Image (cartoon, grey):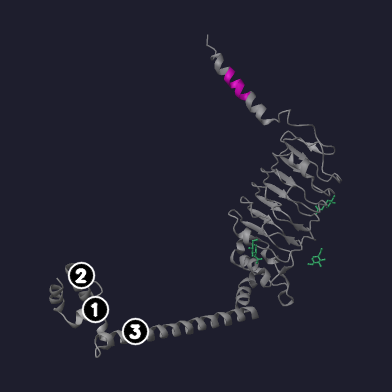
Amino acid sequence: MRLAPPPSAHFLRLVIVVMLVMGATPSPAMSSGCPDRCICDDQLVVQCAGQHLTTFPGNLPLATRQLIISNNRIVELPPLALNYLSDLVYLDCSNNSLKEVSESTFGNLRKLAYLDLSFNTLTRIEDRTFGPLASLVMLRMTDNPGLVDIHPDAFSENAALQVLDVSRNNLTALNVTSLVALPSLRSMGLSGNPWSCACDNEDLCLWVHVEGFKFQEEGQTVCGSPADLQGSRVGEVGLGLRALCHQMLGSWDYLFFILIGFAIFAAGTVSAWGMGVVMVLYERYVKRKGEQSDPEGGARGLQKVEEEEQVVGLQEMGQMGRTGRMGRTTSEVRGHPGNGDRKASHGV
Ligand SMILES: *[C@@H]1O[C@H](CO)[C@@H](O)[C@H](O)[C@H]1NC(C)=O
Ligand SMILES: *[C@@H]1O[C@H](CO)[C@@H](O)[C@H](O)[C@H]1NC(C)=O
Ligand SMILES: *[C@@H]1O[C@H](CO)[C@@H](O)[C@H](O)[C@H]1NC(C)=O
């Protein structure tokens, strides 16, 4: 007769299986039904595509991880309803009638990795619109025909961003300062915009030139202005543009250089004059000293004079120590070397 395995092992296995099953299914407390005209599955995916919705679906399960509301006519993403979905990882809003998104729209979606805003009617993207999306990896924002402006810092906090597509909008310029600094960015879509190939957009053109491999459909990334460059590839004009924009100096630059040149000239003249004056004064001083101590000595005598003064000073101190007399002049001492002792002895 074989022994059955110990019951404790059975029990443990059962507990593990139960835990796995519970982990895989949504906890009932978190899901609160499913919106009308949408399909919710047990993988926390809510599918509402092409349902002629004009408003954002209500009654969404709180634990929703994927929400697909594409191909509807939704005009607004209400911040309050959207930000309840703090576990949202994937959000597809493409092909709707969204007019604007703001900083508060995505304020709480810290786990969101994929966002699609393509085929909408967005006109501009403000600073920090995508700022709260710390996990955003892919952002698609193509085919918004009225989208003319994206704030320079719109993507500056999306450090995880790898793919950004802003193709087929109405963009003429894009400040790439913060984009270039994104550590993970590996793919950009810029095609189908009427890019300006002038100095105001020089950085973008140069970036496409230097890192062409990053850009999808680079062949369709062309200049919309100025007229003589229309249709030229943005990457191809990048280098020429840099030379052009930095070689041509404006009249203010010329004025600046003239003023700087004048300032340097004036400073040089003044300091040369000052030096001259100092030299002349110094020479006069030396000459006067020379005349006082040694009429023929001239400038040569200065050091000598100083040495003499030191020696005389010492002598004088010695005498003062012995005699206690004050106020003897240097010339007195110098004029009658050796006399001091006699005078001192007379005095005593
Ligand atoms: C957008 O959605 C409409 C239905 O609302 C559909 O007929 C159309 O083909 C969709 N367009 C794109 C580009 O997916
Ligand atoms: C694109 O922008 C230009 C001005 O930059 C404007 O004249 C034009 O109407 C815009 N196109 C669309 C489709 O909005
Ligand atoms: C781009 O944006 C940065 C930061 O906002 C700014 O300092 C810089 O001057 C801008 N560059 C251009 C060419 O406008």
Instruction: Name the residue type under label 3.
Output: Tyr
Q: Residue 11 placed where, x, y %?
A: 59, 17
| Above-or-below relation of 51 to 143 | above
Q: Magenta span covers which residues? A: 11-17
Q: Residue at x 60, y 24 (%)?
A: 16
Who's the residue at 20% across and 75% down the image?
311
Residue at 59% of width from left, 66% of height from top? 210
Disc 1 residue type (three-letter): Thr
In percent of the image, x 44 and y 84: which residue is there? 272
SS under mark 2: helix
In magenta segment, residue 255: no
81 left or right, relative to 184: right
Quick check: 145 above or below 52? below
12 drawn magenta: yes
Q: Distance between the residues labelled 1 and 3?
A: 19 Å
Q: Which of marks 1 and 3 is nearer the N terminus?
A: 3
Q: Is mark 1 within 8 Å of ligand 3?
A: no
| Camera-side mark, 1 or 3 | 1
Q: Position of residue 235 (x, y in %)?
A: 64, 68
Query: Residue 148 is drawn in which quadrant?
Result: bottom right
Q: Which residue lies under the disc numbered 1? A: 330
**In terms of sequence position, does the residue under pointer 3 or pointer 2 come before the other?**
3
Say which label, 1 or 2, has the lower sequence index. 2
**What secondary structure is found at the residue carrying circle 1?**
helix
Kindly indicate whether the residue at mark 3 contacts the one at mark 1 (C-beta within 8 angstroms).
Answer: no
Provide residue 315's location: percent of width, then percent of height.
18, 73
Mark 3: which secondary structure? helix
Location of mark 2 (residue): 320
Q: How far separated are the C-alphas under marks 1 and 2?
A: 13 Å
Dot 1, crowdedness within 10 Å: few (<14), some or many (≥20)? few
Residue bearing the label numbered 3: 285
